[in-house]
Image: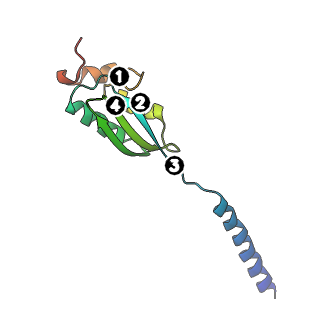
Amino acid sequence: MKSRIFALLVIGATAIGMAGWVGCSSESEAKTVEVKLSTMQCSMCSNTIENALKEVDGVQSVEVNLEAKTAKVTFDDKVTSVPALEQAVTKTGYAANDKKADADAYAKLPSCCQVPE
């Protein structure tokens, strides 16, 4: 008898615990933003930027448009953020939105990837 009561308590507690999971969604929706890349000059630049953005945790897709000097980035906003995306770009030597490129990284870029003065 005691074992039946214990079993019913365990089953009931499990059911109550699982009910809490049903109403609670841990899924996040993907967010898409456009990052302005004013200092991107060539296809080598776009490849470098695309690869840097793809390495950011939470990034799902990246579409770099060399002609428009932009990148469309889809990401999980519970994992990363726009400032993190901008930082990934600036650390490679390129400007992202209103954030300036890291000076040391910029100095190491090939001359074709540097903005003419």
| Residue denoted by label 2 | 86
| Quadrant, the N terminus | bottom right
Asked if residue 12 is positioned above or below residue 88 in the image, the reply reads: below
Mark 3 or 2: in front is 3
- Using residue 18 as the reference point, say whether residue 4 is left or right of it: right
Q: Position of residue 41 (x, y in %)?
A: 23, 25
| Residue denoted by label 3 | 29
Looking at marks 4 and 3 on the same chain, the residue that comes earlier in the sequence is marked by 3
Q: Secondary structure at mark 1?
A: loop
Query: For residue 106, which quarter of the picture?
Result: top left
Amino acid type, callout 3: Glu
Q: Are marks 3 and 2 in contact (CB under 8 Å)?
A: no
Query: For residue 27, which quarter of the picture?
Result: bottom right
Looking at marks 2 and 1 on the same chain, the residue that comes earlier in the sequence is marked by 2
Looking at marks 2 and 4 on the same chain, the residue that comes earlier in the sequence is marked by 4
| Residue denoted by label 1 | 102
User: Residue drawn 24% across and 23% down?
Assistant: 108
Q: CA distance from mark 1 to mark 3?
A: 31 Å
